[in-house]
Image (spheres, rainbow, N blue to C red):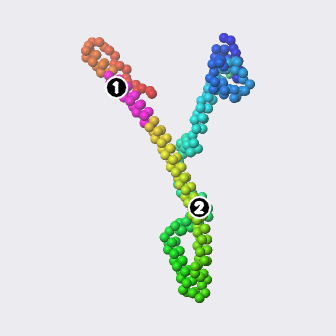
Amino acid sequence: MPKVTCSLCDSVVEGRTLASPQKLENRIIDLIKQDRPEWEGKRGICAHCLEQYRAKKFIGYLEAEYQKLSELEHAVVSKVTRRGRVSKLVHQDMDTQMTFGEHVADRVAQFGGSWRFISLFGGILVIWMGVNVWVLASHPFDPYPFILLNLVLSTLAALQAPVIMMSQNRQAHKDRVQANQDYEINLMAEIEIRDLHDKLDSLRFKQWHELWHIQKRQIELLEHLCERQANPEAKKPVPTPYVPPEL
Ligand SMILES: [Zn+2]
């Protein structure tokens, strides 16, 4: 047998085990050229090198599939492989991360949107007007048509609007995080259920397989009994004992 060298790793192998470059898949040739730009593809490569590049090709396919997943699905896949937990208390997490300003904004928005605020503010308006019209009728600090009251009200409105918007934005962000988490949980549950289905299917298949073999064994024994009854003189050996099948 003529000995030749592999054009990639220079190891000496038998000539017929060498794979010629004409027979290689284009994808594998591309991979080899990526690693070894100086490789001309004129001489063959050994079986070992071929195996390596074949494995590289399949890893490339798997990686390409993984790249197609979205960022969220990546997170779930890595959690499933680590057997981690997806669910967490979003609201608690968010509350501990909140700054003082955000807490205040929440409280102000909560108070500003209550009947308590409306009745309290209505009361203040009535008192303000009452004091200026009747109590301090001779020297009112804000005579009719209550221009100072107007200024106070517009200032209050100007401040209250951004505070409420701040609080609403944060609420929307919280809802978005919660929705994302719900999706992750659903996806993970789906994956786990599929996993369980596969396990059940394989268990059922195994059981059927065993049952079928038991039945075969029973038929063998019955046939043996029938034969022995038909001609008791012929000493036929009992069939070999049943051995559970390997799957
Ligand atoms: Zn080689």
Write the start and end of the magenta stretch as one range. Answer: 199-219
Q: Position of residue 166 (x, y in %)?
A: 59, 61
Q: What is the number of the mark on residue 160?
A: none
Quick check: 164 left or right of 227?
A: right
In this view, the residue farthest toward the front is: 145
Q: Check the image and name the residue furthest to the top.
A: 1
Residue 140 at least partly seen: yes
For label 1, the residue is 215
* Residue 35 coordinates in the image, percent (x, y): 70, 28
Quarter assignment of residue 131 = bottom right
Which residue is disc 2 drawn over?
166
Please name the residue shown 30% across and 21% down the image. 222
Magenta: main secondary structure equals helix
* Residue 210 on the magenta span: yes
Q: Position of residue 223 (x, y in %)?
A: 30, 19
Q: What residue do we see at 44% from left, 37% from top?
A: 197
Identified by mark 2, the residue type is: Met
Is 216 drawn above or below residue 114 in the view shown? above
**Quick one: SS at disc 1?**
helix
Image region (quadrant) for ligand 1: top right
Q: CA distance from mark 1 to mark 2?
A: 73 Å
Q: Quadrant of residue 24?
A: top right
